[in-house]
Amino acid sequence: MSWRNALRLSHRTGPHNFEETCSKIVSYCNKQLLKEGICVHSPSIKAGFQDNLWISNNLLALYSKCHGVDHARHFFEEMPYKDVVSWSGLLSAYVKHGCYEEALELYDLMKFSGECPNEYTLSIVIRACSALRDRNQGTTVQACAIKSGFDSNPVLTSSLIDLYSKCDNKEAAHKIFMNMRNGDTVSWTTMISSFIQEGSWITALRLFICMIKREIQPNEYTYAKILSACGGLTYLNSGRLIHARMLVLGIRLNLVLKTALTDMYARCKRMEDAIKVSKQTLEQDTVLCTTLLSGFCHNLEIKEAVDAIQQMVAHGITPNSYTYAVILNGCSLALTLQLGIQFHSRVIEIGLENNVSVGNALIDMYLKCSGGIIDAFKVFEQIRSPNIISWTSLISGFVEHGLGYEAFQAFEKMQFAGIMPNSFTFSSILQACGMMKSANHTRRFHGYIIKMNIGHDIVVANALVGAYAGLHMVDDAWRIIGEMHHRDVITYTSVASKLNQLGLFEMALEVISYMQEDNIEMDGFTLSTVLSASASLGAIPQGKQLHCYAIKSGFSGWTSVSNGLIAFYGKCGCMHDVKRAFDEACQPDVVSWNSLIFSLAVSGHVSSALSTFEDMKLAGVRPDSTTILAVLSACRRCGLVDMALEYFHSTREANDAVPELEHYVCLVDLLGRAGRMQEAMAIIETMPFRPDALIYKTMLNACKIHSDVPLGEEMASRGLELEPCNPAFYLLLADMYENSGKSDLREKTCGMMKERGIIQKDYSNSWMEKSNKVPLLIAGDVPS
């Protein structure tokens, strides 16, 4: 019987049957039966059933689904009677259509009308708060739920967990989860998803195991999420166990799960397994193919990635904007500019050049592959609606190219466009503040961060710490650290690095104590930083402790750590340990070799330093400008002038290394000490740099040694023109006069120094005294 005949029959059999039939027909109406639903609407009104809430609520749902929220709202306002189902129905429509602010306004209107929300209503409102990241409103709704006795409802608690997770209040989310009496699959999955979103993959995996032990059955979404955690951790065995569990339980591997498995195997560098999973289904879609393509790019198999995109097209699967964004990101990772340009041309051909995802990938590709800020900016200007990623990429590009002013301008334009900065935007713009040495800009952006209430974000807080410390505002940096809800290894490594740069080596070492208080372990970058501080202080016991820690924690194989150890032992004169640290390095690079050569040269082992230089060349490591300086320093130590000149010219020509000012200073010192004054002056006059005060001071020192008063006076005059308050020139000049038997000129020079208020610095506090003040760092590790 057709719905029209049923309607006529029920109309003849009485009002009750007619009303019931209307309700059933309306409830069965969907998008394809919109006309039929409207046809039912008219006779129901004629029959006087407009007051029937059952029919009205079903018609409201119909209009919400088929006509959108505007028609639904109009129908809702015409309803003579409304109940909690009516309000919840329209609220749900607003949320489904992304009208979150309107949903909250409607909720306020509902409360004003005196209608009490039920648990379903509150869960909808919390979803709106979650989408808006409105923690304050969400907390108010939660209070209402507790007051109404709905706080144990699993749907409501799942929504609350999602809200607090998205608002970066993981403690609140975890507390709600732990207080649940009867958590269901949705709530457990929401909590697991929350941990995965913040990168706490191990915690998510532990929670999944606990879920299995409690016999709460995961759903498709749970498995997909936990497989992404295994991929993020590159836990291949765990991923395989989960795959096996699904097969044993007979879970049908649909496209969602096969896509998740493909991604997991690809991230674990098992592309053969990823390909096998992707080919186990006849139903292929763009998402699955793009995931496989992403795997090839992630593993830098660019040729296979290109083949994969060609096979997609051959099988009639159309690559979308995300597909092209993935392949362009692959070009960025592999630094293949020409291939990136080819895909850029393809993107233009199919009309995707204005797409924001593709545009963002192109910006990243040009910045990484060619450093082409101009090309990146051209791409940015073509994007129809740049999003926060677009703006942040552009700002980051400006910062990387040293264009701080342009970065500030881009930030202002972004604000004018109504785009809210995120944590990574602030991280980039605060780097620009440090680069521009602008305390005013730093404070201005700090104020903006406080206003936006994102100072608790660890990325933002770490950037603030780095910015203030880099501006010598150490107290402000420590204040930010003290105010942080959470601190990580980046927090402390950042401040230790800046303290190191400022010469505050003892404070840099004290950072380790703060890390221990927060139960944060040092990583390779932290170790490199504090090793440098130990070397500057000559703190041998502390450095050996750090060496012990590096071995125990497995970081001794890091190139940066082994280089730090070589430099540390070299500066402290522990040559046996220098050689041992070098031999322990897994892959010595040019920095490792340079540190070893410098250490040998400074300690007087000149022949070993020069033979190490030859070993470096035999090992196939290309010398750089620092290598030249190390070799020159070794030659200077023993006065090997001709050998130094030969190394200088041959190494420069063979390696295209451009000598810097310090190389010429070293040569001038070497020639000057040897009494070859004319050759030294010839280097000063012909070098491709404008001479600075240091090179004149070096030459003045040579004049003092050889009592060359006329040339010495000329060097002092030139140097004082550049640095009139530098006491070294007066002292060297006075010593030269003393050596030449001109005591009257010496007294005159000393008197001139006093008249001009130039005071000699006191360097009596030796590094050895400082090293004795530094406490032992790591309890339980006693250096040998």
Image: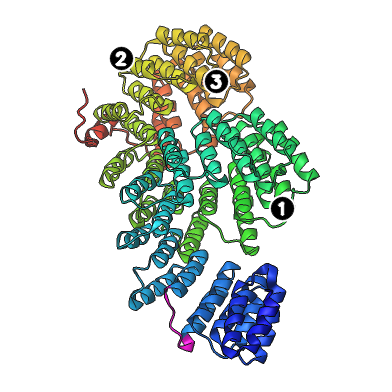
Instruction: Report the magenta residues as a range.
Output: 112-119
Give, as a three-letter code, the residue at label 2. Answer: His
Q: Is residue 207 left or right of residue 276?
A: left
Between marks 1 and 3, how big is the CA–CA gap? 42 Å
Answer with mark 1 or mark 3, whichever residue precedes in sequence: 1
The residue to which callout 3 is attached is: 624
Residue at horizontal 71 percent and vertical 51 percent from the top: 355
Measured as percent of width and height from the top left, residue 507 is found at: 31, 42
Asked whether the viewer can see residue 268, the reply is yes
Q: Circle 2: is it few (<14), some (14-19), or many (20+) Cα within 10 Å? A: few
Give, as a three-letter code, the residue at label 3. Answer: Asp
Residue at horizontal 60 percent and vertical 90 percent from the top: 14
The residue to which callout 2 is attached is: 576
Label at residue 50: none
Helix or strand or loop: what does disc 2 sit on?
Answer: helix
Which of pointers 2 and 1 indicates the residue nearer the eye? 1
Prevalent SS, magenta region: loop
Measured as percent of width and height from the top left, residue 710 is found at: 53, 21
**How many numbered circles does the render carry?**
3
Answer with mark 2 or mark 1, whichever residue precedes in sequence: 1
Q: Is residue 310 left or right of residue 601?
A: right
Q: Please tell me whether residue 535 is drawn above or below residue 458 in the rendered image.
A: above
The residue to which callout 1 is attached is: 383
Q: Nearer the viewer, residue 451 or 98?
A: 98
The answer to whether the residue labelled 3 contacts the one labelled 2, judged by CB atoms less than 8 Å apart, is: no
